[in-house]
């Protein structure tokens, strides 16, 4: 993988400029959930769930979003197994990153996302998050939780 992909919060924080939003991606076979922060990285906003059709379709939609939001870095959900092992899901995300990271040209942090979907479902049931729309997609909400967790972890480690 590219040297701009980090697993250590402090190294990722050091690679970021002092100001600039982050964009989170929750990549699965069928969809990519997207969430972002403000330039000060204080507030996380679920954006939308992109339904995947082809690499060309995904690439164009994501490049359009990068152009609109101009993030300083990306946080990508890293779907480790409960046993801490990288399986097929990590291979799919890695393949996606191999194609996308060179186009994005941004530092990327891999955030453990093992319990994200369950956390979103529990938060919806508790009334802490809005229920999904008519399409039933919650990927963008999962991306928001992934991004919020990454922000908590890098808080105070930023040196940029």
Image (spheres, rainbow, N blue to C red):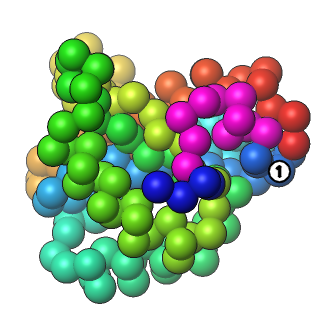
Disc 1 residue crowd, few under 14, some 14–19, many 20+, Cα 10 Å: few
- Of the 4 image quadrants, the one containing the C terminus is top right
Q: Is residue 105 above or below residue 81?
A: below
Picture residue at 47% right of the left edge, 40% below the top: 110
Q: Nearer the viewer, residue 118 or 99?
A: 99
x%, y% of residue 4?
Answer: 62, 54
What residue is drawn where x is 14% and y is 59%?
30
Q: Residue at x 53, y 72 (%)?
A: 102
Q: Is residue 20 above or below residue 68?
A: above
Q: Is residue 29 a member of the stretch shown in magenta?
A: no
Q: Which residues are magenta?
A: 5-14
Would you identify the image quadrant in which residue 8 lies? Answer: top right
Q: Position of residue 113 (x, y in %)?
A: 34, 30
- Classify 12 as above or below 112: below
* Magenta stretch, overall SS: helix
Q: Quadrant of residue 150?
A: top right
Q: Tag 1, which secondary structure?
A: loop
The residue wearing badge 1 is 17
Percent coordinates x, y for residue 105 in the rendering: 62, 69
Q: Magenta stretch: residue 12 in it?
A: yes
Left or right relative to 64: residue 48: left
Q: Does residue 46 appear anywhere in the picture?
A: no
Q: Nearer the viewer, residue 6 or 111?
A: 6
Residue 1 shows in the view = yes
Q: Residue at x 79, y 21 (%)?
A: 156
Q: How many marks?
A: 1
């Amino acid at each position: 993988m590219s040297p701009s992909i980090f697993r250590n919060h402090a190294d990722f924080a050091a690679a970021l400029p002092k100001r600039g939003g982050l964009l989170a991606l929750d990549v699965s076979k069928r969809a990519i959930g997207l969430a972002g922060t403000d330039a000060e990285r204080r507030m996380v906003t679920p954006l939308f769930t992109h339904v995947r059709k082809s690499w060309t379709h995904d690439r164009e939609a994501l490049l359009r979003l990068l152009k609109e939001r101009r993030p300083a870095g990306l946080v990508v959900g890293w779907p480790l197994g409960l046993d801490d092992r990288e399986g097929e899901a990590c291979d799919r995300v890695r393949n996606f990153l191999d194609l996308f990271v060179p186009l994005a040209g941004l530092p990327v942090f891999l955030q453990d996302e093992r319990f994200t979907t369950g956390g979103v479902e529990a938060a919806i049931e508790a009334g802490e998050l809005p229920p999904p729309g008519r399409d039933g997609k919650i990927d963008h909400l999962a991306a928001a939780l992934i991004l919020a967790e990454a922000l908590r972890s890098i808080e105070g480690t930023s040196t940029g």
